[in-house]
Structures are given as C-alpha cells and as structure tokens.
Image: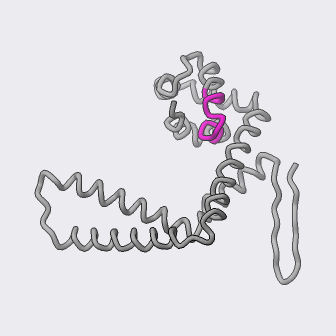
C-alpha cells in the first residue's frame, strides 16, 4: 500500500498526519485515518473520500488535534528514520569513490542529452518519450548533486517540525560561543 498519495493531499491541512503517513508507521496511521473517515483502510479509498467529501479535511484536522501526541510521536519516528538513513548512506560511502563517479557520470549524461536535444531533430512520435527520459535523467542528476550539497531546505523543514513536536535539540555556534536548546 502506498500512502504517499494521501500524504500529499494532507500536506497543508493536517501536516503531522501527512508526515506520519509517509514513514515506517504509514500503514498504521493510514488505518487510523481511514477509521476517522469511515472508509476502507486502503490509500485509494481514503484519497477518494478526501477529494469527494468537503468535510473530510475538517474531520482529519480534528483527528490530528484529538490524537496530537500519538501523531507527533509517529511523525517524529518517521523523521528519525529518514535522517538516520541519510546519515547511514553518507557514513557508508565516506571512503568510496563511487558517489563521485556516479555524480560525474550523471553530469556527463545530462550534458550529452542536453546537447543532443538541441542539435538533433527528434521524430514526432518519439518526442514525448525523449522528454520524459530527459526529465528522469535531470531528476537523477539533481539527486546525485543533493548527495554532496545536502538538502538545506528539507533539513530546515524537518528541524522546524521537530521543534514543533517538542522533541530534539537545537545548537548554534558563533565566534567561539555555543548556544543549545533541548526540546522535550
């Protein structure tokens, strides 16, 4: 079951529920959301209920408020798993040249595809497929670059969510001084 379709629908109205749906406890949270809406515990059924019933988002916001502590814990666990996965990937590959090789290879591929796109006449029947493949290559290239430069925006958003959840800590250094704040 892929709860990401529901997660995207809930991003603005019930963000904690949406975050929990995208994590390791997604199926459990999905069942709770389905129960709150009175539909079958399937992502498609929940998505359909949200799209067809104008009151569904209100019910889910109420569900989020009534179960705030449990939802926050699941959302926090999701964030912990995501951050641990990224840290583990970087730690595992810290002595390997393969990430650099992949990044250089993807840069070369995207450059060659871009050059071919501007210098080659594509048959009308193949244009959509070529554009789709070029889009996929650019997406993968972006992911390989993100490996090196990190995801500052995503990290910032996750830090905000962690502080709103009341867990984690925040540290800042400036001119030899260090401030820290522990969240409960």
The residues colored magenta run 19-30
Q: Name the residue at 65% across, 50% down.
A: 82
Q: In which quarter of the image is residue 10?
A: top right
Q: Which residue is drawn at 51% across and 28% down?
A: 43
- Up/down of 28 relative to 178, above or below: above
Percent x, y of residue 131: 26, 57
Residue 20 highlighted magenta (yes or no): yes
Give the image location of residue 73, x and y in percent: 76, 39
Q: Please, which residue is most extreme toward the front here?
A: 96
Magenta residue check for 22: yes
Exactly how many numbered labels are in the figure?
Answer: 0
Judged left or right of residue 140, residue 182 is right
In the rendered image, residue 15, in percent from the top left (x then y), is placed at 64, 41
The residue lying at 73 percent from left, 44 percent from top is 76
On the picture, is 53 further left or further right than 86?
left
By secondary structure, the bulk of the magenta-drawn segment is best described as helix
Q: Which of 57 and 26 is in front in this view?
A: 26
Q: Percent position (x, y) of residue 49?
A: 50, 23
User: Residue sitting at 62 percent across and 34 percent down?
Assistant: 26
Taking 145 as reference, is 125 above or below it?
Answer: above
Between 47 and 148, the residue placed more toward the observer is 148
Q: Nearer the viewer, residue 74 or 46?
A: 74
Coloring scheme used: one colour
Q: Is residue 120 above or below residue 87?
A: below
């Amino acid at each position: 079951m892929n709860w990401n379709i529901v997660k995207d629908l809930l991003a603005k109205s019930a963000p904690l529920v949406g975050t929990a749906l995208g994590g390791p406890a997604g199926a459990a949270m999905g069942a709770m959301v389905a129960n709150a809406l009175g539909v079958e515990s399937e992502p498609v059924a929940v998505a359909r209920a949200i799209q067809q019933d104008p009151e569904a988002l209100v019910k889910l916001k109420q569900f989020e408020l009534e179960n705030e502590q449990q939802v926050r814990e699941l959302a926090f666990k999701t964030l912990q798993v995501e951050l641990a996965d990224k840290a583990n990937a970087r730690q595992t590959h810290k002595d390997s040249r393969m990430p650099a090789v992949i990044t250089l290879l993807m840069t070369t591929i995207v450059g060659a595809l871009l050059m071919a796109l501007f210098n080659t006449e594509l048959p009308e029947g193949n244009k959509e497929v070529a554009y789709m493949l070029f889009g996929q290559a650019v997406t993968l290239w972006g992911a390989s670059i993100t490996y090196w430069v990190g995801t500052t925006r995503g990290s910032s958003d996750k830090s905000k969510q962690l502080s709103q959840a009341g867990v984690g800590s925040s540290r800042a250094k400036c001119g030899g001084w260090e401030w820290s704040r522990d969240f409960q």
